[in-house]
Amino acid sequence: MTLSLFMAALGIALLLFLVLRQKMPAFLALLIVSLLVGLMTGMSPLDVIEAIRNGMGGTLGFVAVVVGLGAMFGAMLEHAGGLEAISSRLLKRFGDDKAGWALGLVGFLVAIPVFFDVAFIMLVPLIQKLSLKTGKALLTYALPLLAGLAVTHAFIPPTPGPIAVAELLSADLGLVIFFGFIVGLPTLIIGGPVLARFYRNTPAMTGEIYETPPSDKPSISFGHAVFAVAMPLVLILLSTFQSLDPEGLKPGGILDRLVVKDSDWRMWFKFIGHPFTALSLACLYVYVAFGLVRNVPRETIGKIMSKALEPAGVVVLITGAGGVFKQVLIDSGIGADLAAAVSSTGMPIILFAFIVAFLVRVAQGSATVAMITAAGLTAPVASVAGLSSADTALAVISIAAGATMTSHVNDSGFWLVNQYLGQTPKETLKSWTVATTVLGLTGLAVTLILSLIV
């Protein structure tokens, strides 16, 4: 067991060395580390190759489809003006005095279909104009928005991170969405509007406003945008409920009303609510409602959706390499030894998952790599421990919380915030780094509490 644990630690150290010191792409680094760990633990060369094929194929069979569909869906929502529709309605409803709360919800909603960096760049002019208009500190508006974006980006599918981790841990996606909302909302409140109060004496907006090019089409309505975002999530959640055993539910209870009794109809609900079907229907909907109905040329729609697949492709390949790493750990026996070691310490698997994600995040900066690496190490532990569906979903959220922690100078997101808020690196450390740490710790705390209840 000691040798296996040493090899796992050596593999992580080598991965960090290749990514940090050699600037090697994470996809290539994960594959090389998987090859070396497999060979050094006594696997035959052909068994290592088989593990790579099984790990890559088994992971990408799900993740590639879901991430690709989610990226196209988000691109069409952005092009149709969905971000502007959601932000303008919520800000109008909450008013200037409670704009921070509105911006937190804006970030929380728009980051479900739109990548974090894209959504932030699109919405930066909004918080800058609010700061100029009210004379209040820019951070009182920026931190709630960033908190909403960061929480959803890490906690709630169909964003790539939680999709990848859920697949690696074999977690039910509907439960991950459900717990993502439960954990995400209090995490957003504490790490967003509440934390922003401590920055109200920092400078207000000055200088240039980063304007985004206006669309030549009017924005869709708030209700239309929210409906589009909610549609695939609701379908996936309804499908999750159909997996419950009708015989074990309280007659007349809430869950009993949600579960279809007829087995044939239940099968169709599961089919419609499977992420493949739900997101395909969502993409078809925005293709028609946000494209054809609004007289957007078909060539333009095709370019928008195709271009959205470019950044998604990087995430998909890294996730596949993470699946390879997980499979090598399982086939080499390291996973079982790691599970035994974690069990002997009495440490909850949820806490173990958080710590691994946090350490990798701080060391190399990328939240995506941190989530996938932590998932690769946690998956065999969770499998041996025989976690319930709820606990497995909570482990996904715990990894997300750990990977959100402590964004600093080795994270591209740190410099994105630094540039668009016009801060010095020291100021960004005092604001954004503190905020992500609060988000991660709050997410862990709520997840641990839930694990004692469910």
Image: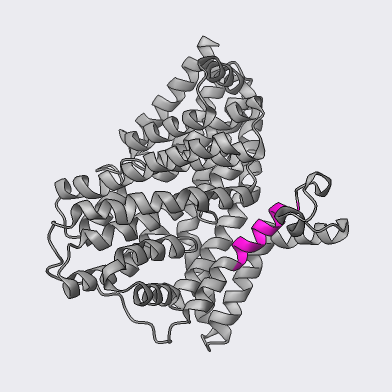
Q: Across the whole image, how many numbered discs are drawn on residues?
A: 0
What residue is at 64 percent from the left and 29 percent from the top?
383
Q: Which residue is drawn at 14% across and 64% down?
A: 204
Image: 332 above or below 393: above
| Left or right, 326 with reference to 314 | right
**Render colour scheme:** one colour
Q: Foreground residue, 199 or 335?
A: 199
Name the spot of residue 141 as percent of width and height, x first: 26, 63
Measured along the vertical axis of the image, is residue 292 above or below residue 261? below
Horizontal relation, residue 264 to residue 155: left or right: right
Give yes or no for residue 240 being in the magenta stretch.
yes
Magenta highlight range = 231-242
Quadrant of residue 196 within the rendered picture = bottom left
Of residues 448 and 73, which is closer to you in this image? 448
- Side of 30 relative to 244 (left or right): left
For image coordinates 49% across by 40% down, the residue present is 447
Q: Is residue 82 above or below residue 101?
A: below
Residue 142: x and y in percent read: 27, 60
Examine the rendered structure and indicate whether residue 42 appears above or below residue 84: above
Residue at image point 87% right, 56% down: 263
